[in-house]
Image: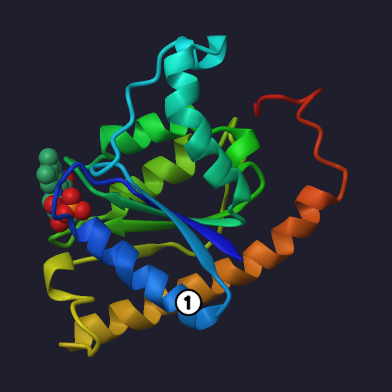
Amino acid sequence: MKFGIIVGSHRAKSQSAKVAGYAQNVLKMIDSSASFYTLDLFKDPLPLWDDGIWNGAPEWKKRWDPISAELRACEALVVISPEYHGMVPAALKNFFLLAGKDEIGHKPGLIVAVSSGRGGGYPVAELRMSSYKNSRLNWIPDHMIVRDAEHVLNGVASASEDDTFTRSRLDYCLSVLHQYGIALKLVRESGVIDHKNHPNGL
Ligand SMILES: Cc1cc2nc3c(=O)[nH]c(=O)nc-3n(C[C@H](O)[C@H](O)[C@H](O)COP(=O)(O)O)c2cc1C
C-alpha cells in the first residue's frame, strides 16, 4: 500500500517531522511492501491557494501536478498537525484548499496532533470539523495526540511510561489505518461514487 504522510509544521526541525519518520518505520513493519509519499510543508512549502489552480495557470500546473499525481497514488493518509495557538497551522489549512476529491477522496486519513506540552486537542477538532467536506477525505474514528513531543518517540527504545503509551497508541492507530486502506479501496472501486452529480459535500 502507498501511504501519504503530510507534515503540517512550519518549523525546520519540527517534532511533526520526527513523528512522521516514526510513523513511516511502523508502517513498514505493518506492511513490508508499503511505499510512501511524504510532503513536509516546511521543506516543500506550497504557495497560498489562488484562482490560478482552478483556471489551469501554468505555474500551478508545474507546482501542483506532481504532488497531485503522488497523492492520487496513495491509498491512505497520515496527516500530522502541530497545534499552533490552538489551531491547525496555515500551511496545512492551505494544503486542504489545494488537495481535493481527485487526490484524497474516500481514502482513510489518520489525524496525528503534536504538542510540546499537554495540548493537541484543537487540531483534532478542527480537522474533524472542517477539512473533509469537499475533499471527502475519510478521517478514521481513532486519532492520535503526541504530547510532550520532545521527550517521546526518540530512538528505538522507549524512554518512559509516557513514551511507551505514545508508541503503543500510535502503532495501534497506524494498524487500524492500514486496514481502512484495504477496506476503502472497495468503496472507491464500487462504482457508487458519483462526483459528477455530487461534486461537493453539504
Ligand atoms: C506559533 C506556535 C504556536 C504554538 N501554540 C501551541 C499551542 O497552542 N498548544 C500547544 O500545545 N503547543 C503550541 N506550540 C508548541 C508546539 O506544540 C511545538 O512546537 C511542537 O513541537 C509541535 O510543533 P512542530 O511540529 O512545529 O515542532 C506552538 C508553537 C508555535 C511555533
Bin the neighbour count of mark 1 within 10 Å (Cα to Cα): few under 14, some 14-19, many 20 and up.
Answer: some
Residue at the image point whose x is 47% and y is 39% from the top: 129
Residue at the image point whose x is 13% and y is 60% from the top: 116
Q: In this view, does 19 lie to the left or right of 198?
A: left
Looking at the picture, how far across and down is residue 157, in whole percent?
A: 23, 90
Kindly identify which residue carries mark 1.
Answer: 28
Looking at the picture, how far across and down is residue 199, in whole percent?
A: 71, 24
The one nearer the camera, 176 or 155, is 155
Q: In which quadrant will I find the C terminus?
A: top right
Q: In this view, does 14 lie to the left or right of 135?
A: left
Residue at the image point whose x is 56% and y is 58% from the top: 140
Q: In this view, does 50 lie to the left or right of 105?
A: left
Please tell me whether residue 157 is drawn above or below residue 192 in the rendered image.
below
Please tell me whether residue 158 is drawn above or below residue 49 in the rendered image.
below
Q: What element carries label 1?
A: helix
- Residue 148 visible in the picture: no
Residue at the image point whose x is 19% and y is 75% from the top: 152
Q: Could you tell me the amino acid type at mark 1?
A: Lys
Q: Which residue lies furthest to the right in this view?
A: 191
The one nearer the camera, 42 or 78, is 42
- Residue 201 visible in the picture: yes
